[in-house]
Structures are given as structure tokens and as C-alpha cells.
Amino acid sequence: YSKIGIIGAMVEEIELLHKHVEKTSSFVKAGIEYTEGSLHGRQVVFCKSGVGKVNAAVCTQLLIDAGVDCVLFTGVAGAVSPSLNIGDIVISTSCLQHDMDVRPLGFARGQIPFQETWDFRAASDLVELAGSVSEHLFPGRTMKGKVLSGDQFIASRDVVRELYEELDGACTEMEGASLAQVCAMNGVPFVVIRSMSDKADGSAHVNFAEFTVQASINSHAIIEGMLQRL
Ligand code: ADE
């Protein structure tokens, strides 16, 4: 990979990149600032997308238009798999939009009508690399699995159980599957890296406030490790 795109949704998720990059230039498009430079000897372009699927989709396309040949996402998520704890890591094997729901017309939950693919597969080389970096940094606390995305902050035990049982999610967040779909449309490899800030249950809002900074640091550490080995 000669130019690596990196997206985070919130300031906590992206500020560590700003701290370490040797910035060469920046540009603004669609109201978002993109920073270009060198990070651990690699050419990168990164931005803070803002929250949600539309923001992530626009940023992903603009990064691809700026010439990146892969896209990494760094950030936090709510745990869906019961075996995950706060701070643990999920590396996306695939990403699906859990709020895409056209079941009344006979489509499966999450299925984008008239499309063959809606569970977008991450690039296996990026998944392997992220997994080995993460297992090294956070032994026994790394899971590879399906990332579920929707324009919803999940904070209910019943909803999170349903996401696990019906859609086999590892974690839930608000951007990954949108980035994944745009990458698939462009034939660009991606992986989503998420550290758990909460368990998407009745305590999610409290845990999110308390643990987002640490979880963002965990996710960023994996990006750093990857850049050194990409
Ligand atoms: N990001 C972090 N925690 C989340 C949650 N519970 N739901 C959606 N996005 C999240």
C-alpha cells in the first residue's frame, strides 16, 4: 500500500494521529478537513468524519478520490458478543448495516434490496495484520468478527441480544459498514478496528463517557503497529 487512508468519527479517535503525523498538506472538502503526511514512514491521509453512516460514506469516497489504496477505521464501539469486555478489541472480518431493514418486502434483515452483497468482507491481509498486532498488544482480548453499523446508539440489553442472535455481530457502531460499502463499490481494501467503550446495554451511556478515551487509545495503538508493518 502506497497511500493509506484512516478515518475516525470523533475527536478522541483521531487526535492521536494529529499528534504523531509529520504533516505535509491538508485540504477541506464537504466541510471536512483531510490531513496528509507521513506517519511511521508511511504516506497517510486521515480525517475526522463525524458520527454516522452518511458522514463516513462521504469521507471514504473523498479519501479514495484523493488516491488512497486502502482505508482503515479507528475508534470505539459497543460490545455485542457477550464474551467481550470494555477495552477489548474487535477486528472486522465483515461489516453489515443493522438498520437496513426491508423485511416487509421479503428481504433479509440487513440486506440491501436488489444487491448480492450486504455483508461487506474486509481485506484478509489487513485483518490478519490487525489481528496479529492486536493480539501482541492485547493478548487474549482480540476478537475477529462482524461489525454491525447503524445510525443508532444502542443502549438496551434486549436490542443488543437481538443483534447478537439474529445478525451474529461482534460489536456495534455507527460508521464501519458505510465505509465498507463505499470501499466495496470502489474495489478498495479496508479493515475496521474498534475497542469497546461499552456493552451497548442500559449502562452504555455512562460507560461510553468513561471509557471512550482509553478505548480510542487502544484502537490507535493497533493502527500504529500496523503502519510499522504494512
Ligand atoms: N459506539 C460506541 N458505543 C456504541 C453503542 N453502544 N452504539 C452505537 N455506537 C457506539
Image: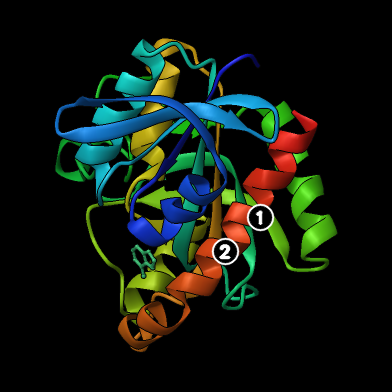
The residue at 47%/41% (across/down) is 95
> Does the image show residue 191?
yes
Q: Quadrant of the N terminus?
A: top right
Q: Is residue 126 left or right of residue 66?
A: right
> Does the image show residue 166?
no
Q: Is residue 78 left or right of residue 70?
A: left
Say if 8 sits above or below 227 in the image.
below
Q: Does the closest atom of ligand 1 sit within 8 Å of the Cβ of label 2?
A: no
Element type at mark 1:
helix
Say if 51 sits above or below 139 in the image.
above
CA gap between label 1 and label 2 equals: 6 Å
Q: Does the closest atom of ligand 1 sit within 8 Å of the Cβ of label 1?
A: no
Q: Are marks 1 and 2 in contact (CB under 8 Å)?
A: yes
In terms of depth relative to the viewer, which is nearer, 114 or 38? 38
Q: Which mark is residue 221?
A: 1
Picture coordinates of residue 192 (x, y %)?
53, 43
The residue at 31%/69% (across/down) is 154
Q: Which residue is mark 2?
A: 217
Q: Quadrant of the C terminus?
A: top right
Q: Residues within 10 Å of mark 1 (few under 14, many from 20)?
A: some
Picture coordinates of residue 39 (x, y %)?
62, 34
Picture coordinates of residue 207 (x, y %)?
41, 84
Q: Is residue 116 left or right of residue 6?
A: left
Element type at mark 2:
helix
